[in-house]
Image (cartoon, rainbow, N blue to C red):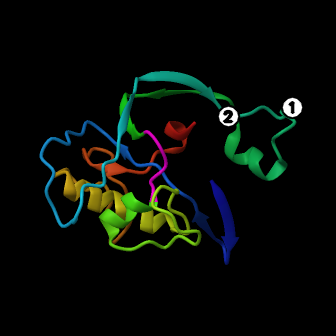
Amino acid sequence: MRRHMRNGLIIIFISFIAVCINCSKDNPVGPIGEDPNIKMISIPRGSFLMGAEVEDKFVTSDLLYYMRPVHMVYLDGFEMSETEITQRQYKAVMQTNPSQAVGDSLPVNNVSWYDAAQFCNRLSDYYRLERCYNESSWECDFSKNGCRLPTEAEWE
């Protein structure tokens, strides 16, 4: 993930991975012209230690605030796309390709966090799942069964 700070906002220029919680993709339908064919893999529930100690040589002082203290994280099982979202998959869902280096099998890039969240909502629509993101406030409702971006702990 590559981040860039601009005017106090973090702009994320990434290819991204979609997460689906308790989803069933058996009855696709929707405004998408072609099946995005996103292969999901099951991530089992589990726990791990997350964070860093002051002595960690890879932790800079500005990151230390966000990474301390080391703590146990518990995750329920979920499904995550096996690979980053490709340009073909993104275009099938969003009808556009914002990527700079173009190629159907390349990861989509040059998308904001909002673009990625909107992609997840539209993918949820396609699979007849509940949207996770409120597109007015951009808050995520983690109780919904649709597609969303992984949390920091899920990404770890």
Residue 113, x across and y down, in percent: 49, 64
x 21%, y 66%: residue: 33
**Residue 117 appears in the rendering:** no
**Measuring 28% from the left and 56% from the top, which residue is drawn there?**
123
Q: Point out the stretch of residues depicted in magenta.
A: 82-86
**Crowd rating for badge 1 (residues with CA inside 10 Å; few <14, some 14–19, many 20+):** few
Query: Which residue, given by chain and number where applicable, does mark 2 sit on?
Result: 51
User: Residue 16: percent from the left, percent from the top?
Assistant: 50, 54
Give the Cα separation between the discs numbered 1 and 2.
12 Å
Residue at the spot 43% in from the left edge and 68% down from the top edge = 115
Task: Where is residue 5? Give x, y as percent.
Answer: 69, 69
Q: Position of residue 109 (x, y in %)?
A: 54, 64
Q: Is residue 138 left or right of residue 103?
A: left
Our reading of the magenta stretch's main secondary structure is: loop
Where on the picture, by quarter, is residue 75? top left
Q: Is residue 146 above or below residue 73?
A: below
Residue at 78% from the left image edge and 31% from the top image edge: 53
Provide the residue designation for mark 1. Answer: 55
